[in-house]
Image: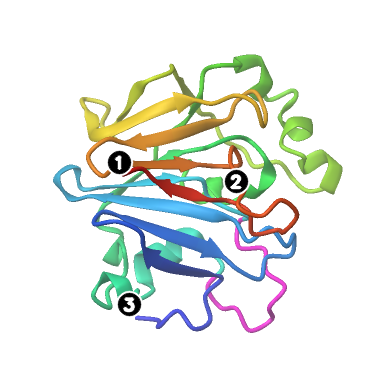
C-alpha cells in the first residue's frame, strides 16, 4: 500500500472517529478541508465535502483521487492503515455548500453513494444555475454532475441503505456564506464541522476551521 508521500491529500485524527483530510498543492490554492467520520457499526464513512478533485500543481503527485487515497494510503494516526482499507466500508457524502472547492471530487462517489445537501434553498442548487453558483463558470471548468438529496434542518444522515440514520450526527442549515451552507453537529463528540461559515484566517487560502465545543 502507498505511504502517501506522493498523494494529493494528508490525513490526521481530530477525534476518536473523525479525521481531517487536507488537499494540499491544489491548482486553485484553496487547500480544502475534508472531514471523514468512520462509523464501523454502519460499515460507513461519512464525508463532509470532497475538495478540488485532486487537481494538483505538483508534478510528483501520483494519487489524486480522494477515494483512492482513503482506500489505499496509510495514515499514521490510524495505526498506519488506510481509513477505508480496500474500500470495504460504504460512503455517505454531505456537501457543506456548492462552491467548486467543496464539490469537484464528488463524481468519484456519486455513482454508488448517497449525496446530501441542504434543503434550505433548493432553487440555488438546480442544475441550470449550479455552474454559476458553484463558481465553476467563473473558472471556466466543468461543473461536476451529481444529484443530491436535500435534507431538512436538524435531520439525521441516512445510512447508505436509507433504512436508518447514522448515530449522533445532525445536519444544520447555516445559510449566510451562501444559501445552501450547512454544518454537521456530532452530539456524542461535541464537534461542529463547517464549510466556510467560520474563518480562522481572513485572507489566507487555508481558511476552513473545525471547532471543538467543550
Circle nearer the N terminus (1, 3): 3
Which image quarter is the C terminus in? top left
Asked where in the image residue 78 lies, by quadrant, the reply is: bottom left
Residue located at (44% from left, 65% from top):
68
Residue located at (36% from left, 35% from top):
185
Q: Which residue is mark 1?
A: 190
Whether residue 93 is visible:
yes
Horizontal relation, residue 95 to residue 88: left or right: right
Circle nearer the N terminus (1, 2): 2
**Whole-percent x and y of residue 43?**
20, 48
**Whole-percent x and y of residue 165?**
24, 28
Q: Over which residues does the magenta segment extend? A: 53-63
Q: Are marks 2 and 3 in contact (CB under 8 Å)?
A: no
Residue lying furthest left: 41
C-alpha span from label 1 to label 3: 24 Å
Q: Would you place residue 151 above or below residue 37 in this image?
A: above
C-alpha span from label 1 to label 2: 23 Å
Badge 1 element:
loop
Circle nearer the N terminus (2, 3): 3
Horizontal relation, residue 26 to residue 171: left or right: right
Q: Which residue is mark 3?
A: 76
Q: Main secondary structure of the magenta part?
A: loop
C-alpha span from label 2 to label 3: 25 Å
Badge 2 element:
helix
- Nearer to me, 181 or 109: 181
Label 2 Cα neighbours within 10 Å, binned few <14 / some 14-19 / many ≥20:
many
Q: Which residue is mark 2?
A: 102
Residue located at (43% from left, 16% from top):
152
Q: Which of label 1 and label 3 is nearer to you?
A: 1
Is 60 contained in the magenta span?
A: yes
Amino acid at each position: 500500500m502507498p505511504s502517501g508521500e506522493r498523494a494529493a491529500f494528508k490525513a490526521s485524527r481530530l477525534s476518536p472517529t473523525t479525521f481531517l483530510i487536507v488537499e494540499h498543492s491544489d491548482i486553485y490554492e484553496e487547500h480544502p478541508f475534508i472531514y471523514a467520520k468512520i462509523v464501523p457499526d454502519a460499515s460507513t464513512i461519512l464525508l463532509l465535502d470532497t475538495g478540488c478533485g485532486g487537481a494538483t500543481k505538483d508534478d510528483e503527485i501520483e494519487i489524486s483521487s480522494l477515494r483512492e487515497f482513503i482506500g489505499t494510503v496509510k495514515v499514521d494516526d490510524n495505526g498506519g492503515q488506510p481509513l477505508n482499507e480496500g474500500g470495504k466500508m460504504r460512503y455517505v457524502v454531505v456537501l457543506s455548500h456548492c462552491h467548486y472547492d467543496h464539490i469537484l471530487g464528488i463524481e468519484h462517489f456519486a455513482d454508488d453513494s448517497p449525496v446530501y445537501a441542504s434543503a434550505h434553498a433548493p432553487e440555488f442548487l438546480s442544475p441550470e444555475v449550479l455552474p454559476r453558483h458553484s463558481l465553476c463558470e467563473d473558472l471556466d471548468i466543468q461543473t461536476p454532475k451529481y444529484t443530491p438529496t436535500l435534507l431538512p434542518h436538524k435531520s439525521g444522515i441516512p445510512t447508505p441503505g436509507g433504512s436508518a440514520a447514522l448515530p449522533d450526527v445532525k445536519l444544520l442549515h447555516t445559510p449566510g456564506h451562501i444559501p445552501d451552507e450547512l454544518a454537521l453537529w456530532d452530539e456524542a463528540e461535541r464537534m461542529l464541522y463547517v464549510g466556510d461559515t467560520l474563518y480562522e484566517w481572513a485572507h489566507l487560502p487555508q481558511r476552513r476551521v473545525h471547532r471543538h465545543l467543550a
